[in-house]
């Protein structure tokens, strides 16, 4: 079944799309399902958390119809995942590792 959808939920300060992935089963009454939001990539230099969230998404999607516990989770819950909350900061951190960049690029934020 279709378990995964990806939508843009807005844009960063520099205009990069911020995407959210939803993993759940189709349900006739979506109001009956619990909702979970997992975000990562908040701090620019945190490279591992987005990878871990992606692995979790992969496990959920690939294990449906195989693992009874994952079936139950997805039949009763909407899992919402945002891999990079701060794509601008991540871009700066990757291109300029000597800066030890941690924040976003909004001029109003303090580095």
Image (tube, rainbow, N blue to C red):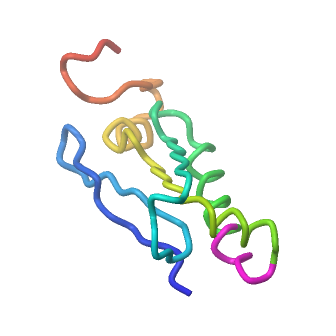
Q: Residue furthest bottom?
A: 1
Instruction: Tell whether position 18 is magenta.
Output: no
**How far from the left and from the top, in percent, is residue 80?**
49, 54
**How far from the left and from the top, in percent, is residue 67?**
81, 74
Q: Eyeballing the image, is 38 above or below 8?
A: above
Left or right: residue 73 compared with residue 102: right
Q: Eyeballing the image, is 46 above or below 99?
A: below
Q: Nearer the viewer, residue 15 or 91?
A: 15
Q: Nearer the viewer, residue 57 or 37?
A: 37
* The magenta segment: 60-66
Query: Which residue appears at 50% of the width and 74% of the height?
Result: 27
**How far from the left and from the top, in percent, is residue 104?**
32, 29
Instruction: Tell whether position 65 is magenta.
Output: yes
**How far from the left and from the top, in percent, is residue 62?**
69, 77
Quadrant in the picture for the C terminus: top left
Name the quadrant containing residue 66.
bottom right
Query: Which residue appears at 49% of the width and 73% of the height?
Result: 4
Quadrant in the picture for the N terminus: bottom right
Query: Which residue appears at 28% of the width and 59% of the height?
Result: 8
Left or right: residue 28 compared with residue 79: left
Query: Which residue appears at 82% of the width and 73% of the height?
Result: 68
Q: Nearer the viewer, residue 10 or 78?
A: 78
Left or right: residue 45 compared with residue 65: left
Count of picture labels: 0
């Amino acid at each position: 079944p279709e378990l995964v959808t990806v939508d843009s939920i807005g844009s960063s300060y520099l205009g990069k799309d911020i995407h959210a992935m939803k993993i759940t089963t189709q349900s006739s009454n979506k109001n009956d399902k619990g909702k979970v939001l997992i975000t990562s990539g908040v701090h620019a230099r945190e490279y591992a958390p987005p990878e871990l969230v992606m692995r979790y998404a992969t496990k959920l999607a690939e294990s449906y119809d195989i693992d009874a516990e994952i079936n139950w989770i997805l039949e009763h819950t909407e899992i919402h995942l945002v891999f990079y909350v701060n794509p601008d900061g991540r871009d700066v951190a990757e291109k300029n590792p000597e800066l030890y960049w941690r924040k976003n690029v909004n001029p109003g934020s303090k580095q």
